[in-house]
Image (cartoon, helix red, strand yellow):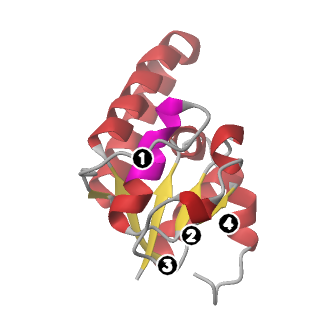
Amino acid sequence: MVRSVIDANVLISAAFGGTPLDAVSRAFSIGEVYLSPAIVAEIVGTIERLSSKLGEQKTGILSTLWKRFESLCRMAEPERGVSICRDPKDDAYLSLCAAVGANYLITGDKDLLAVDPSRVPSFSKGLKILTPRQFLEADAGEA
């Protein structure tokens, strides 16, 4: 079973279509997508911060899509946190990857993309940290 973790910015961007939505759809089609309480809090906070820019109607649509997405994910609470990323707030993603043995971390965050995946303790065959486009271009046999 392929296990993926998806960055909050990719998830929010997916609501507007394009490559992020295609990557999220692919992650669900090939396996399970995981969230943690820390990542849920980040996403909810991001939606709240964006609400003044998006307006009431678009915020409502985004919130509805987020609730649908959240209902499809598996929740996990990492027992131990890792401290690897140059941006400490991004360690929540790496901690979740380690906890669930993720195969993929899908992100556009340069700090996460700079992490050497071999440094993330994991019980999976090996974590790949990819942009949404790279994830879509990855060989389906790898997934």
Q: Is 56 a magenta residue? A: no
Q: Secondary structure at mark 2?
A: helix
Q: Which mark is residue 82?
A: 1
Task: Name the residue rendered at 32%, 43% in the picture.
Answer: 67
Q: Secondary structure at mark 4?
A: helix
Instruction: Classify 87 as above or below 141.
Output: above
- Residue 49 in percent (x, y) is at 48, 15
Q: Which residue is mark 4?
A: 135
Q: Nearer the viewer, mark 4 or mark 2?
A: 4
Query: Looking at this rendering, what residue extends furthest in the bottom direction?
Result: 141
CA gap, disc 1 and disc 2: 27 Å
- Amino acid marked by disc 3: Ile
Viewport quadrant of the C terminus:
bottom right
CA gap, disc 3 and disc 2: 6 Å
- Amino acid marked by disc 4: Phe
Q: Which residue is mark 2?
A: 26
Q: Secondary structure at mark 3?
A: helix
Left or right of 44? Residue 94 is right
- Residue 8 in percent (x, y) is at 50, 40
| Frontmost residue, 10 versus 86 | 86
CA gap, disc 3 and disc 4: 12 Å
Marks 4 and 1: in contact by CB < 8 Å? no
CA gap, disc 4 and disc 2: 9 Å
Task: Name the residue rendered at 46%, 34% in the picture.
Answer: 62
Q: Which quarter of the figure has residue 111?
A: top right
